[in-house]
Amino acid sequence: MPVADLQRRVEMLQNTVESLRTLPADVRRLGRRMGRAESQILQFRTEIHDEFSAIRREMATKADLVDGLAAVRAQMATRTDLAAGFDAVRAEMATKAALAALRTELRVEIQESVAGAVRELSSAIAETRDDLARSIRDQLAEAQRQTRMLFEDVVDRLKILGERNPHPLRGN
């Protein structure tokens, strides 16, 4: 066998022996990890068992279901109860319809009343305006008559004064 080949084989053997030296420590670490994993698996198994037991205790039996359904049936409304309920709803709806009709009737009455009040107010305003215009015309006519009388009186007095004192520039 050649020397180079033998050296290579010896080196390989040394490497293998060297890696085998750390093997017991690696096995111990692996053993500890396996122990922890086993402990966790046992704990998980216990928790699962307890949860399933609790679920089984909580699950309803067939008798429980029958009793529950019977209670639901007892609480459900009978046909007579439903008919009475529908009659009450119909009566309430009729009342609402009557109220709506009354509201419409009142609205029409109010509108008519407001329209009548507007007509009366418009008539009163027109009448007041006409009375006011007539009164102003009468007062204006009276004022004109008094002004004419005062004017005529002033003219008459001026004539009298003019006759008493003749004007120096006039030739009288």
Image (cartoon, helix red, strand yellow):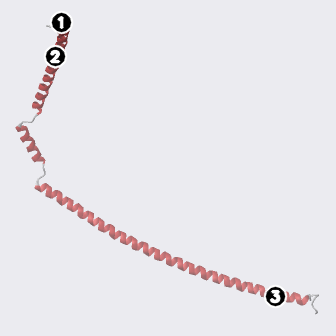
Circle nearer the N terminus (3, 2): 2
Label 1: which residue?
3
Instruction: Check if mark 3's residue and mark 2's residue have beta carbons within 8 Å.
Output: no
The reply to whether callout 3 and callout 1 are in contact (CB within 8 Å) is no
Q: Nearer the viewer, mark 3 or mark 2?
A: 2
Q: Secondary structure at mark 2?
A: helix
Which one is in front, 56 or 157?
56
Q: Quadrant of residue 170?
A: bottom right
Q: Where's the N terminus, which quadrant?
A: top left
- Asked whether 84 or 59 is in front, the reply is 59
Of the numbered discs 3 and 1, the one sitting upstream in the chain is 1
Residue 106 locus on image (x, y percent): 35, 69
Dot 2 or dot 1, earlier in sequence: 1
Numbered mark located on residue 94 in the image: none
Question: Which residue is at the far front?
Answer: 2
The answer for how far apart the CA atoms under marks 3 and 2 are is 146 Å
Say which mark, if any, is on residue 155: 3
Q: Is residue 137 left or right of residue 161?
A: left
- Mark 3 nearby-residue class (10 Å; few <14, some 14–19, many ≥20): few
Residue shown at 60%/81% (left/top)? 133
- The kind of residue on which mark 3 rests is Val
> Which residue in the protein does label 2 denote?
34
